[in-house]
Image: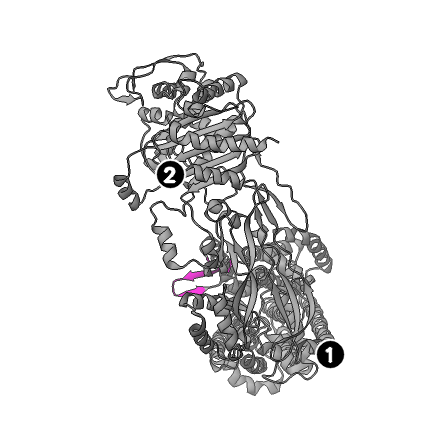
Amino acid sequence: MTPDNGYIGIKLHEAPRRQWLSRLHVDLPLLAGLLMLAGAAAVILYSAGGQKLDVLVRQGTRLGLAMAVMFVIAQIHPRYLRLYGPVLYLIGVLLLTGVLLMGETSLGAKRWLNLGVVRFQPSEMCKLSVPMMIAWYLAAQPLPPKFRHVVAAGILILVPTAMIAKQPDLGTAFLVGVSGAAVLFLSGMSWRLIAALAAIGAALLPVGWHFMHDYQRDRVLMFLNPEADPLGRGYHIIQSKIAIGSGGIYGKGWLRGTQSHLEFLPERSTDFIFAVFAEEFGLLGCLGLLGIYLFILGRCFSIVVQAQDSFTRLLSGALTVTFFVYVFVNVGMVIGILPVVGVPLPLVSYGGTSMVTLLAGFGMLMSIQTHRKLMPN
Amino acid sequence: MSFEPLSLKDRLLEQRVFLNRIVAAVLLIITGTAGLALRLVYLQVMGHEHYSDLSRDNQVKISPLPPPRGLIFDRNGEVLADNVPSYSLELIPERVPNLSQTLEELKALINLNDEEIRRFNALKGRAKNFESVPLRLQLGEDEMARFYVHMPRFPGVEVRSRSLRTYPYGELAAHVVGYVGRISESELQHLDPSIYSGTYHIGKNGVEKTYESVLHGKTGYEELETNVQGRAIHVLGQAPAIPGADLHLSLDIRLQRTAFDALGDFDGAVVALEPATGRVLVLVSKPSFDPNPFVQGIPRAQYDTLQRNPGRPLYNRALRGIYPPGSTVKPFMALAGLEAGGIPASRRTYCPGYFRLPNSEHKYRDWRSGGHGSVDMKYGITQSCDVYFYDLALHLGIERMHDYMSRFGFGRRSGIDLDGEKAGLYPSPEWKRKHRKQHWFPGETLIAGIGQGYVQATPLQLARAVGILANRGRVLEPRVTDRISSTLEQENPYPPTELEPIAIDPGHWRTVVDAMIDVVHSQSGTAKGIAPGLTYHVAGKTGTAQVFSVRQDQEYKKMHVKESLQDHAWFIAFAPAEAPQIAVAVIAEHGGHGGSVAAPIARAVVDQYLKSLQP
């Protein structure tokens, strides 16, 4: 065995496949996992979207575009990802400032920046630029990070997170915060510090409550007691639970979910699509879907442990953890163990905004995997 | 590697730490996923039977129970806004097989117009599919009969009883009570659908609007178990609606009628307050309108007629009509002179019938061209001598006038609990610089001193100002709502809001009020005509407003030519002068002289109110 200097040897039998795939910088297992997920998404979206083909076509087009973005990013060498990290981060913060100052208001929240041709959500960009920035910063320090480095990284995370929370978009702010925190966690920040922060966080909850908007408080209250307002916010959760529970072990069958088709279930193609899936495919289907997610996560972790330097390790690890948090928060909300926050089910929910960001992240993972240096054995 | 400085990274350590963390992350993910899976097992295996029952053939439907709207009473318990049952034709979209065809057939049967169909479609958009959506709110008896004959042809269409808002006193209190109307599409955007599900009306005006959240109540719901066709089988659960709270206004509808009738054929406004509490007793704006047609959606033609009426009946003159207050400002000016200008009441000014600024040829005229001779403050008020107040204004200066008059509420919104109040205007050099981009001219100070020129006030503001005077400087926010009583909290105390008082020297107060008593009770008073038969003292002041009327649009110009160039007649008063119970302001548009036209109207109101207070 060679002295461990950061390189992990490549097994010989991988070599032939790498020859043509590495030229395209595509990671086949990851791509396979994503395509499986897209297949499941198509099946359930067809049912949830009222069996309209144009819904599928539109979503397919978005997926195609997002995939293209993923392939393009996979071509970028990780050293450039590292180089661009701080730049993207600064641009993100500037754009967020722009949104707060002159963004377009939609549904009471300022999230969009109108750049003439396209409307753009800078908060989406931060889901990637924040972990890139923190990974860039911590990778330059000896790890595990010293206290002052943790503090500096914490500030770097808090600035965009607070700006997004101010929009207000608590869901995205939470995800951005998590993506940065994941880097800190993986970098080896001490357990004692983590415990202390958790304690402070719990103590600050009442303060956070004070700063929330009424509708956000409503959501928290409804999560705690959905039956209190069955006509309003609680309606989502009650109907969602009925849909899931009535699905049973085997489900009611494809296109035969009564809850969803009789329009009892709101937002059934977007945030609550998991409930439609659970009603029609039952417990077995749900476990299967979670299995696909686990397969993707497994492949991501294998990329993470093969990564060759601190920056790529931290970045890929954080993206992986964040991806799981997406799934967990959405499914947790739909099955009634987390409050209702507007987080879509990754790659399955109808809509294109977050899909590009997600697949761009997977593009980075592919880049990290396919640009490794071969060990001169 | 030995040459590397110590600060450089320890790759081995870094990798070990990182791998540890990866293991921790994987463990977390496994735990999280297991948590999700367990919850799914709980819902889909353990809870399956329960949720299947709720979902299978029998659907649980939650149907809103709209709360009855709170009633509105006057101070004596007379009902000003009532709910009466009415029959409406409603559709449940889910149960109607072919909606557009059904609508076509109904159109032929009961005379639906396009407006109603458009509104129905808008309402349908926000209702859940199994909720009943009204198509026609007030169904006539013959229409109902015709529908019942053909009912089997219309599955999902039914006649329902709903309550309908009515205003028994019609135009009499329309500007105070306001009215409810169908929720418009733009209002829909801002309403909480869970509060307004099942409700189709919302306060548009008056206290119906100001107190919408109180009057509306809380929507209840019924959890219904229904069969495949959507028919209710039985009620699973219920949360009754909580009725809206009742409003008890301080308004006295009988007094309101007296004021309304006393105005006769004049357009104008009457506002009367209880000085000690700020409660509004009378708030008349004339001409008025019948609010009842607005509840159902007023027909276009009828609305256009109201809009085109040159008297502008929809316009609430009492709080939106801005008029020059004219001589009614004189008591307040006199008080400003005493309090802020150090001018003694005994100081005399000679009135030759006009006033000249030093070094100026321009004559500022007195209303009596022959002049009043030598005038002191009291006589200046009693006779309404313009020259005395030109001189007083010159001594005070516009800044001090502005400061003092603002404290009596001139140029400021009073804060009454009705929508759309105007602030009027009390000018200052600063205001003129800002809004007219001009310097202040000394002559404008004189004109402001007799309540003309830029000075503009609403009838409500004058009633309030004279109320503050009656109160010896106590300042209260006027309010038409006395108390709110809901079934839950029985009666909510609703104390008046008191603002920072104005300190007035009792001697100064006495001087001004004595002069105002003389306006009515002395032989030289400008309102002596109402004195005969009075058993108490009235402190009053007449006024005439020279320039604009409420109508500042095109119709006005036509009217102006046609109608007499008579001034608006003002009268403000409180009584009894020694222990004030009521303060009142009256304006009769084009009424000519305040003393002969406006003062008798005020007397009628004051007389009746004081009589009603006697046991």
The outermost residue toward the left is B361
Instruction: Give how far across and how far down residue A298 sits, in percent.
Output: 65, 77
Q: Amino acid at mark 1?
A: Glu
The kind of secondary structure the magenta stretch mainly shows is strand
Instruction: Name the residue rendered at 56%, 52% in the picture.
Output: B82
Local crowd at mark 2 within 10 Å, few (<14), some, or many (≥20)? some
**Which residue does the numbered mark 1 point to in the structure image?**
B49
Report the coloring of the rendering.
one colour
Q: Is residue B185 left or right of residue B429?
A: right
Parent chain of label 1: B
As for residue A117 lying within the magenta part, the answer is: yes
**Which residue does the numbered mark 2 point to in the structure image?**
B266
Instruction: Name the residue rendered at 33%, 36% in the picture.
Output: B548
Instruction: Give how far across and how far down residue A51 sits, in percent.
Output: 52, 82
Judging depth in this view, the residue of A206 and B349 nearest the camera is: B349
Instruction: Give how far across and how far down residue A330 sits, in percent.
Output: 62, 70
In terms of secondary structure, where does tag 2 sit? loop
Magenta-tinted stretch? A104-119
Residue A76 is at least partly visible in this image: no
- Res. A358 image quadrant: bottom right
Q: Quadrant of the C terminus of chain B?
A: top right
